[in-house]
Amino acid sequence: MRRVLCREFADPERFELVEEPDPEPGPGEVLVAVEAAAVSFVDGLIARGGYQLRPPLPFTPGTAVAGTTPDGRRVAALLTSFGGFASHVVVPEERLVPVPDGVDAGVAASSMESHGTIAFAFRDRVTVRPGEWVVVLGASGGIGQAAVDHARAAGARVLALASTPDKRAAALAAGAEAAVGYDAL
């Protein structure tokens, strides 16, 4: 397998690509051939050592992947630690989410990261009740659209903030009830 290795906290250009044997799954685990790994702003912060979480060095960045199992299932997973920037990862079976036919692996991986972040926020940081208004900043990005989805699923009304008319239109198409630019504040 191939994997990206971060030996020091530095710019991602300092990552190293290494070759090593494929990992072996243990009981209750599945080997996934990675087709796509989500890459986010936070990944860059972590690589530079500028995030509140600092993994022990060396490490392989990446926390969300999509790919196939040895039996041909298309799956995605939000990893419990790092390691997603690799050609193969071992994932506990219960963490695998099926990816429907026709869904791009890149979309599946990035959706795991975005929706996982917002699911945590809605479960552990905020309470949203039906009929309440939720203001979503950056509503057209991955995290923003996931926030719109989760707020709507909770029965809330969503006011989306986005910088351009096209981004506001995307937020409305994603389910926001209203959308305004930052200049309206």
Image (tube, helix red, strand yellow):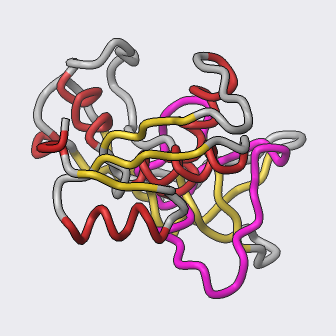
Whether residue 8 is visible to the viewer of this picture, yes or no, is yes
Q: Is residue 19 visible?
A: no
- Compared to residue 51, the image places residue 150 above or below, namely below
Residue shown at 76% from the left, 71% from the top: 70
Asked if residue 101 lies in the magenta stretch, the reply is yes
Residue 140 occupies which quadrant of the picture? Answer: bottom left
Span of residues in magenta: 79-108
User: How many numbered badges does the structure rendering display?
Assistant: 0
Q: Residue at x 34, y 51 (%)?
A: 39
Q: Is residue 87 magenta?
A: yes
Image coordinates for residue 78, horizontal then vertical, percent: 61, 44
The quarter of the displayed image where residue 32 is located: bottom right
View extreme (right): residue = 27
In front of the other: 79 or 132: 132
Q: As drawn, is 158 to the left or to the right of 74?
A: left
From this view, report whether residue 55 is shown above or below residue 78.
Answer: above
* Pick the front one: 96 or 117: 117
Give percent across and percent down for residue 4.
33, 47
| Horizontal side of residue 153 vs 113, given as left or right | right
Q: Quadrant of the C terminus?
A: top left
Report x, y in % for residue 137. Answer: 33, 40
Image: 99 above or below 44: below
Q: Position of residue 154 (x, y in %)?
A: 72, 41
Q: Quadrant of residue 58?
A: top left
Residue 32 located left or right of residue 8: right
> Seen from this angle, which residue lies furthest bottom?
102
**Residue at left offset 82%, top offset 75%:** 71
Position of 129 compared to 138: left or right? right
Residue drawn 46% across the image and 65% down it: 36
